[in-house]
Image (cartoon, coloured by chain):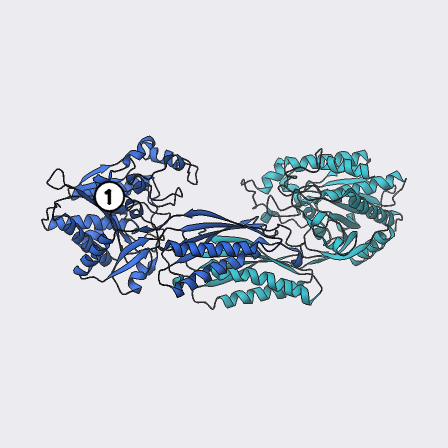
Chain colours: A cyan, B blue
């Protein structure tokens, strides 16, 4: 099985070796994503699965149960990547789901339910700034009018990209599945962190997905010549904003010390105006990303940041405005699937760690419609979205074991 | 004279009113700069001055002395602007020099020396990142090979711009004047600060021009997912860099409290990588601009910043590198011209204030070759490089008075 995993990992990544210096770039609805999807189709067909493409570009590879009216469970992830990303984010989930099917087929297993291995289209936001397009379409969450307005850096709209991919933009909403079409969904993904190892475990079983609050803080001072404006006559927006960067870090750290649910906060973006050497910064915009599966916790922290910014307004020369860009409830995954996965992982001989996901995945959308689960396997040093992203064949194999056990458990009987 | 100043101010700015919402944009070697130069030519010719353009695009308007071998004094500034700049930075100096000639002509004055009113080309660095091209050419300071490599945002090289302006790039170095060609140079400029008013004066007489030290500080941490990387496992380059922004401001303020020569320091630019919402900043570059006419003072402060950055390296996860982009000696202007100007200003009935310039001007280059002086007039609230830049007709008139007195003093006798 390890050899098969190694071989098919290369095949799904359309490469001959995984240590590509510039990593992998398969942006949403590009020729590169399509090539990886074609590889998925080939591997699935080798396993005698019946592959169909839906109108959003998702591929569904079905292992048909004997009974016509059998329910269907789905497993999968995606094959698109960020720019210069790794070959495991998404690919690990697609690969291990196919591998689990292979293992069960090799043992002569006969499922009493249909098994769909799905390869979702366009999960990453790298090209269009919107993520999980394929799974949103499946879950009926596409907001077509809003989506029609987004463009990539070259000014190509997602509508144009979808159509040059060979799909019909007009039909994209028809990719929605009914609640009856699926019984459940399970995704395996690399952790993109190091909590599994840090907790002495081998497999992570995810309780919930932390959706971010994103704040945009605008600090206005007064631009002026750096050489002619004395130090005591300045309203430097960057100087005013700097302590906020420290405050965000410090408060998030402190919060993790006094309670157990993880919370993270990051000043991840800055735009300075005019950002030239001989002019005092007149305006600075900072972007703050705050996450925790505990919505109350993350909202409390955001409120603390807002208060801090309000107090910055006490200075006469500085005006601060806080705009909330995003504030979504976190997603809580189905608890009975979590329990099954914990049990099946331990049965497979691996130590399981219950944890939260700080990143979003296709499962977020699927969980809105179907009982859903998410399994993490470790990736080296937690590095992801980077050419150095790496998951070992051993860990992919362990993931395969758990997925196979899950499929067997779920489809041995037609309940 | 005030009416003439008002009229010609509009004419030199190629406008019908000075309160243009978007200010004035006359970038280096553009059609807009040429239009202003043509206006200069027209005004100078109305005053019966003989106008010639040199191979760098500078215009020289000469009031010829009767004697063929008379020495020449020069006065002037520039007419190009930054993007959306004001109509006084540069224009004030050109206008008042022409007005001083008019005043003396109106009184029947006969100079014993030639008087050149110069309109330098391309003083601002806004288009090509290099400043004072015209006066550099006059002073023989053009580094042609280096200059040939610079381009504007559209990829147009300065060579192409110079040629489409109607000049020959190959010949540009021939704009250099010999030491004998000029006896002295005087520039009038708006202060771009508020020291004149703050000191209860009306005219600033500049002792020296503070040339900057510019440092580029690169802080490297580790980019990682904002959602999946716990607070205690981060190497956030922006968090590491933030205290430096505060430190630069605090140390510069402190230094001004303990000694009298002004010194300024500004973190004026930032580039964050990758600067996206869901990734922890992996690298940040800060640009620091440090100025004082006391070179020892500014170098001491720069050294303090370098030491601070070295100490940041003590953290295992963060690597800091400081690169010195620019470190030029400050320019000290001719002291006998300063004394004359102080005396002539007081004689004209205005309060003079001896001060330093924090900004660079054409006079910096001229001072390297010829005894040179710089006069400041106030501008409203010190605002410059901005549509709100404004100098009153009264202050322009006072500047004219001093320039006229200076010309009369310098050219009444053929020494």
List the residue tagged with mark 1: B118
Location of residue B376 by image quarter: bottom left
Q: Residue A21, how many percent across, how many down?
A: 64, 38
Q: Is residue A249 above or below residue A7?
A: below
Q: Relative to the observer, which residue lies in front, A212 or B145?
A: B145
Q: Is residue B224 above or below residue A306?
A: above
> In this rendering, does residue A277 appear at all?
no
For label 1, count other residues whose C-alpha is less than 10 Å away and answer few (under 14), some (14-19) or many (20+). many
Location of residue B370 by image quarter: top left
**Chain name for mark 1:** B
Side of B83 relative to B343 (left or right): right
Number of numbered markers: 1
Q: In what quadrant of the picture does the N terminus of chain B appear?
A: bottom left
Q: Residue B318, how many percent across, how many down?
A: 59, 52
Q: Residue furthest left?
A: B108
> In this rendering, does residue A23 appear at all?
yes
Side of A200 relative to B6 (left or right): right
Q: Relative to the observer, which residue lies in front, A59 or A260?
A: A260
Q: Residue A168, how many percent across, how many down?
A: 64, 39
Side of B180 relative to A299 (left or right): left
Side of A334 relative to A241 (left or right): right
Q: Residue A380, how many percent across, how many down?
A: 72, 47
Q: Residue at x 65, y 39 (%)?
A: A23
Q: Tell me the element at label 1.
A: strand
């Amino acid at each position: 099985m390890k050899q098969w995993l190694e071989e098919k990992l290369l095949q799904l990544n359309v490469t001959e070796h995984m240590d590509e210096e510039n990593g992998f770039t398969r942006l949403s609805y590009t020729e590169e994503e399509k090539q990886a999807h074609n590889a998925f189709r080939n591997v699935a067909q080798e396993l005698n699965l019946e592959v169909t493409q839906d109108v959003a570009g998702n591929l569904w590879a079905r292992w048909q149960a004997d009974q016509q009216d059998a329910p269907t469970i789905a497993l999968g992830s995606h094959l698109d990547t960020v720019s210069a990303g790794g070959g495991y984010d998404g690919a690990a989930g697609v690969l291990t789901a196919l591998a689990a099917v292979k293992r069960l087929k090799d043992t002569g297993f006969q499922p009493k339910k249909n098994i769909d291995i799905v390869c979702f289209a366009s999960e990453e936001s790298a090209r269009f700034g919107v993520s999980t397009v394929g799974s949103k379409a499946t879950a009926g969450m596409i907001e077509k009018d809003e989506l029609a307005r987004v463009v990539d850096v070259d000014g190509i709209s997602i509508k144009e990209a979808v159509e040059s991919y060979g799909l019909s933009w007009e039909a994209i909403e028809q990719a929605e599945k009914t609640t009856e079409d699926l019984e459940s969904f399970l995704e395996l993904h690399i952790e993109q962190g190091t909590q599994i190892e840090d907790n002495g475990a081998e497999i992570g079983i995810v309780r919930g997905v932390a959706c971010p609050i994103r704040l945009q803080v605008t600090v206005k001072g007064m631009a002026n010549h750096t050489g002619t404006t004395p130090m005591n006559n300045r309203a430097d927006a960057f100087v005013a904003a700097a302590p906020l960067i420290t405050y965000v870090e410090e408060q998030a750290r402190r919060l993790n010390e006094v309670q157990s649910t993880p919370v993270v906060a990051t000043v991840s973006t800055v735009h300075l105006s005019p950002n030239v050497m001989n002019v005092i910064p007149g305006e600075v915009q900072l972007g703050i990303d705050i996450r925790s599966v505990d919505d109350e916790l993350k909202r409390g922290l955001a409120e603390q940041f807002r208060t801090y910014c309000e107090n910055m307004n006490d200075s006469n020369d500085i005006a601060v405005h806080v705009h909330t860009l995003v504030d979504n409830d976190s997603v809580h995954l189905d608890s009975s699937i979590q329990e099954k996965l914990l049990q099946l992982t331990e049965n497979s001989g691996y130590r399981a760690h219950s944890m939260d996901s700080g990143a979003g995945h296709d499962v977020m959308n699927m969980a809105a419609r179907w009982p859903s689960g998410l399994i993490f396997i470790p990736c080296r040093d937690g590095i992801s979205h980077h050419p150095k992203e790496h998951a070992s064949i051993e860990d992919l194999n362990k993931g395969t074991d758990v997925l196979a056990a899950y499929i067997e458990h779920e489809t041995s009987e037609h309940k």
